[in-house]
Amino acid sequence: MNEKQKQLAKQNGGVSIRVVGIITTVIAIGLSFYAFALSGYIAETEISLAAEEARYVECSNAVDELQAASDYLTSESRMYVVTGRREHLDNYVNEYAVSSRREKAVDVMRSNVAENQEAINELEMALDSSNGLAKSELAAMRLAADYYELEDLPEEIATVSTDLFRSTPDKDSKLNAARGLVLSDNYDSAKKSIVERVQASSMALLEDLNADLQTSSDAMKSLLFQLRIAVALLLCVILLFVLALFMYVLKPLGRYVERLSGDEPLEPDGAYELHYLANAYNTIYEDNTKRIEQLRKYAEQDPLTGISNRGGYDNFLATHTRNIALLLIDVDNFMDFNAVYGHDTGDAVLIKLAEALVTAFRSTDFPCRIEGDRFAVIMTNMNTELRYAILSKIELVHSILDDDSSNLPAVTLSVGAAFSTEGMNDKDIYRAASTALSQAKQAEPNSVVFYGEGVVTADEE
């Protein structure tokens, strides 16, 4: 063997990466199919487990909601009987006839106890007792309303049978009778019985749900254990092939990780693919840096009012054009106002208006000052059926502005509102709201115009 052959043999000596690659690939494919099948079973089990957990949470929440609603009705009925304040009566009626949290919670629990007769029986008895207690509460508030000479009673109170009043001819007797209905030991005993039945029903239900959760959890643990074994075997098989690639892949990757941890651009190193990856990352890194700078610029606050400026408005609206309402708000005759009272007073009014918008609207809404005395509010999750919500918010803004504790002159507002529709972009909805605002400014002060509809005056609000 000559020197050239020795060198060739030396170059070709050792384990062939190609052979190792073929062997490890065949074994890895088999283990991968097994792991893939396991992952499918795990996904199915996870869905089942999530469904059971959701049922558990839903039922737990329903139990809490039922108890909270019942306690709320008790509290409001007692407060009204004791104080005679109309707001407690209205709160009770709203909970009893509108919110109906008890009925909704019971419906949720019914849907989850179809196979548990014990839970159903306890739940039905609890609901019957609660309805009976509600009748006592309604009767008590009817008596109290007569005592406090309250007029314009809600239908739920006004229609309570008057047969109960025959034994209470004078006002004091009516109030005493009302207090006896909701402040007596019998009432507390009935309340306690309802709580015990709800707890019994919930315990029976939650025991079943816990059993289902445990079954799903055990199945998940078993599948995860098998998957870990499969992954461990797969890792062992490919280790030989990984060792051969260490110098050109893993070692450079270690340096990449260090630079990524330091939020630094990468220095191309190792294999061609890693060079490509580093260059691609560096391009994304530069673009992302520019975007962050732009976002910071957009996020700057309006220096006068402290709320977002036009840049923030444009950025927000560019990504929120579905199911929104855009309100454009102008202070009427603001130039004349500044001429009369001065710019300092005008600035104070704008600050107060910005604070009123932040106070009146939801945290999910986006108030901003887009120019001069023009403000905008982007209301999310809105549709045309929620006009009343917009009017109530604007009415609250008016009430805040009308508060003279700050000794600022009174101002009026013109409001143009538009709802997003299919196919609208940010410019379209702005044009619609601007058109509505122009119509509002031509009407009387404190007018609101919805795009494509008529004017809503302050009295109508």
Image (cartoon, helix red, strand yellow):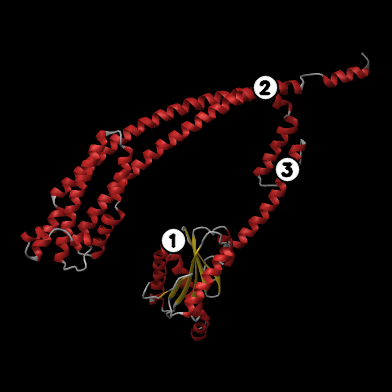
SS type, badge 3: helix
Q: Camera-side residue: 230 or 431?
A: 431
Q: Camera-side residue: 408 or 42?
A: 42
User: Which x, y percent locates residue 234?
Assistant: 62, 24
Q: Residue 61: name its quadrant.
A: top left
In primary-sequence order, the first of circles 1 and 3 is 3
For the N terminus, the image quarter is top right
Q: Residue 51: name its quadrant.
A: top left
SS type, badge 2: helix
Spot the residue most to the right.
2
Determine which residue is flagged by label 1: 362
User: Which x, y percent locates residue 72?
Assistant: 26, 53
Measured along the vertical axis of the image, is residue 240 above or below residue 190?
A: above
Is there a contact, CB below 8 Å, between mark 2 and mark 3? Answer: no
Dot 2 alpha-carbon crowd within 10 angstroms: few under 14, some 14 to 19, many 20 or more: few
**Circle 3: residue type:** Ala
Q: What residue is shown at x 84% (from left), y 22% (from top)?
A: 11
Spot the residue most to the bottom.
340
**Circle 2: residue type:** Val
Determine which residue is flagged by label 3: 278
Q: What residue is shown at x 19% (from left), y 68% (from top)?
A: 150
Task: Quote the CA–CA distance across marks 1 and 3.
Answer: 44 Å
**Circle 1: residue type:** Arg
In primary-sequence order, the first of circles 1 and 2 is 2
For the C terminus, the image quarter is bottom left
Dot 1 alpha-carbon crowd within 10 angstroms: few under 14, some 14 to 19, many 20 or more: few
Determine which residue is flagged by label 2: 26
- Between tags 1 and 3, which lies in front? 1
Q: Is residue 87 left or right of residue 340?
A: left
SS type, badge 1: loop
Q: Residue 314: name its quadrant.
A: bottom right
